[in-house]
């Protein structure tokens, strides 16, 4: 069985210029091969040092046990400010705590049942849109992931005029935006100004203008008592239990911007890779299709999609949409006997942890069945964190697992996906882990035409 594609790692020793050139190409292939075996690596630049931590005890220290000592790195979040303002993704300290106290209740387990019908409707629409033949799958994945966000957050489908405008503005933004997390490695001083391309600033301003309209319209509907019961209404009507303050409009615009970005880019990346992995593993594909044959439009149907869920989990292991998380050390620390100076960049890399040779058996192989074994329980405790962990864990994790599983089941119930042998996708990190030249698959209807009429 051929292994799923992985970027070629660079040699373990390389000059600073070689390193920089590699980074400009891609942050994943710029990393040395030894990071799949090492517990820690230090990167030196004239202005600061970065530490990539694979040691599970260190990861726990940074993310779970002492997160206040390692806030989000300003080097990285500065690049996102024009779009995200002061959203929960970029803030720290008291401001961040206040935002999470309002946001978290909207995503609690029980509320997943309420978003199920909207995600089901988006999945049906994606099946109806899918064309046969050779298809570049990533745009289709982005389309349905954006549809899921519009339907669950604002109760509007992507066909809505305002939703269309936001979606297109995001696409433009993604094409011009800087590569996330690169700043943690670039050997520039912290005071070095962040230059944003004019096109990035323009599309960020356009997105924020459109989202402001959605948010103010919703505020009016809430005041009139006519607002639908969805995530936006829930978040906008929840006061912070500590300060009793709800989000002001501008604050809500910041949060909506991150829900679109974090919620649709990531899910689209995972869905694209999941379809590629199934296309290259036809036996697993048939097992998903067999499970999906029993799909019912009720929340309980999810408990029958065990293998499909494990396919999605295994996809998130091999292609974690967020490949690296970057924190900054607020004070001097000691990591594995080494002194870590104040201001050092601390990089936790789901990409390397998920394929770490000392944590996983067959780390580069696609094996969804591994998720039913006891070994995986241990390995995943130490080396699996597609949604991060600790207090800053992704609030949308449960939502994203539901969405990924349901979208896969819907698509596999209706279609067969085949890989193109001459088009092997090479993973690269943009805003999320994407394929360098897209993911191209041959799509054909699975069931005889008559049996598909109910879902088309
Ligand atoms: C497969 C899909 C997803 C993946 C892999 C994912 C992954 C992540 C990761 C790794 C982080 C932490 C980033 C860091 O600390 O630097 C994060 C944060 C976040 N995610 Fe997700 N996410 C997904 C879907 C979603 C969805 C559907 C939503 C909301 C609708 C969402 C909302 C957020 C927010 C608001 C944060 C910031 C949390 C904070 O900093 O306190 N994500 N996500």
Image: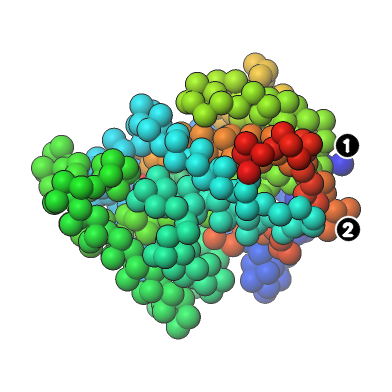
Q: Farthest top residue?
A: 374
Q: Give percent across and percent down for residue 323.
A: 58, 50
In the rendered image of this protein, does residue 418 appear above or below residue 254?
above
Q: How is the image coloured?
A: rainbow
Classify mark 2: helix, strand or loop.
loop
Q: Nearer the viewer, mark 2 or mark 1?
A: 2
Q: Determine whether 107 is above or below 24 in the image.
A: above
Judge whether 134 appears above or below 393 on screen: below
Q: Give the structural element (helix, strand or loop) at label 1.
A: loop
Residue marked by disc 2: 422
Q: Position of residue 309 (x, y in %)?
A: 61, 29
Q: Residue at x 45, y 36 (%)?
A: 117
In the image, which disc is placed on residue 53? Answer: none
Residue 237: x and y in percent read 19, 44
Q: Earlier in the sequence, mark 2 or mark 1?
A: 1
Q: Where, by quadrant of the figure, is residue 97 drawn? A: top left
- The relative height of residue 293 versus residue 234 in the rendered view (above or below) is above
The tag on residue 1 is 1
Query: Marks 2 and 1, Cα distance to the nearest angstrom?
Result: 17 Å
- Pointer 2 with pointer 1, Cβ within 8 A: no
Q: Is residue 425 left or right of residue 383?
A: right
Residue 360 visible in the displayed image: no
Horizontal relation, residue 252 to residue 48: left or right? left
- Would you call the spot at circle 1 few (<14 residues within 10 Å), some (14-19), or many (20 or more)? few
């Amino acid at each position: 069985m051929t292994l799923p594609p992985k970027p070629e790692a660079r040699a373990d020793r390389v000059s600073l210029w070689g390193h920089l050139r590699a980074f400009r190409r891609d942050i994943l292939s710029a990393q040395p091969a030894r990071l799949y075996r090492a517990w820690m690596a230090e990167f030196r630049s004239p202005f600061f040092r970065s530490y990539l931590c694979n040691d599970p005890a260190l990861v726990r220290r940074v993310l779970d046990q002492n997160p206040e000592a390692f806030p989000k790195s300003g080097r990285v979040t500065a690049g996102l400010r024009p779009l995200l303002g002061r959203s929960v993704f970029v803030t720290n300290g008291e401001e961040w705590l206040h935002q999470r106290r309002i946001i978290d209740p909207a995503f609690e387990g029980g509320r997943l049942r309420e978003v199920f019908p909207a995600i089901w409707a988006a999945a049906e629409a994606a099946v109806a849109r899918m064309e046969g033949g050779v298809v570049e799958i990533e745009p289709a994945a982005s389309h349905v992931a954006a549809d899921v966000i519009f339907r669950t957050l604002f109760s509007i489908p992507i066909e809505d005029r305002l939703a269309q405008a936001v979606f297109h503005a995001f696409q433009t933004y993604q094409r011009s935006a800087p590569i996330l997390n690169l700043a943690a490695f670039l050997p520039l001083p912290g005071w070095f100004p962040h230059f944003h391309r004019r096109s990035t600033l323009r599309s960020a301003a356009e997105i924020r203008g459109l989202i402001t309209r959605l948010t103010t319209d919703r505020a009016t509907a809430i005041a009139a008592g006519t607002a639908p019961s969805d995530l936006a209404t829930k978040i906008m009507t929840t006061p912070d239990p500590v300060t009793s303050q709800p989000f002001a409009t501008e604050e809500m615009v910041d949060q909506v911007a991150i829900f679109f970005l974090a919620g649709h880019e990531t899910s689209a990346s995972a869905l694209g890779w999941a379809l590629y992995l199934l296309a290259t593993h036809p036996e697993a594909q048939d097992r998903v299709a067999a499970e999906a044959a029993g799909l019912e439009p009720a929340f309980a149907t999810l408990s029958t999609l065990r293998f499909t869920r494990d396919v999605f989990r295994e996809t998130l292991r091999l292609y974690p949409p967020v490949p690296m998380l970057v924190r900054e050390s607020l004070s001097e620390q000691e990591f594995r006997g080494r002194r870590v100076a104040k201001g050092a960049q601390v990089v936790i890399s789901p990409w390397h942890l998920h394929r770490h040779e000392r944590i996983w058996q067959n780390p580069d192989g696609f094996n969804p069945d591994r998720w039913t074994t006891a070994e995986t329980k241990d390995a995943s405790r130490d080396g699996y964190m597609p949604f991060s962990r600790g207090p800053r864990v992704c609030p949308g994790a449960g939502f994203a697992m539901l969405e990924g599983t349901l979208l896969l089941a819907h698509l596999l119930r209706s279609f067969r996906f085949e890989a193109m042998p001459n088009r092997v996708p090479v993973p690269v990190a943009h805003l999320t882990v994407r394929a360098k030249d897209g993911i191209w698959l041959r799509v054909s209807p699975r069931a005889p035409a008559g049996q598909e009429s109910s879902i088309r």
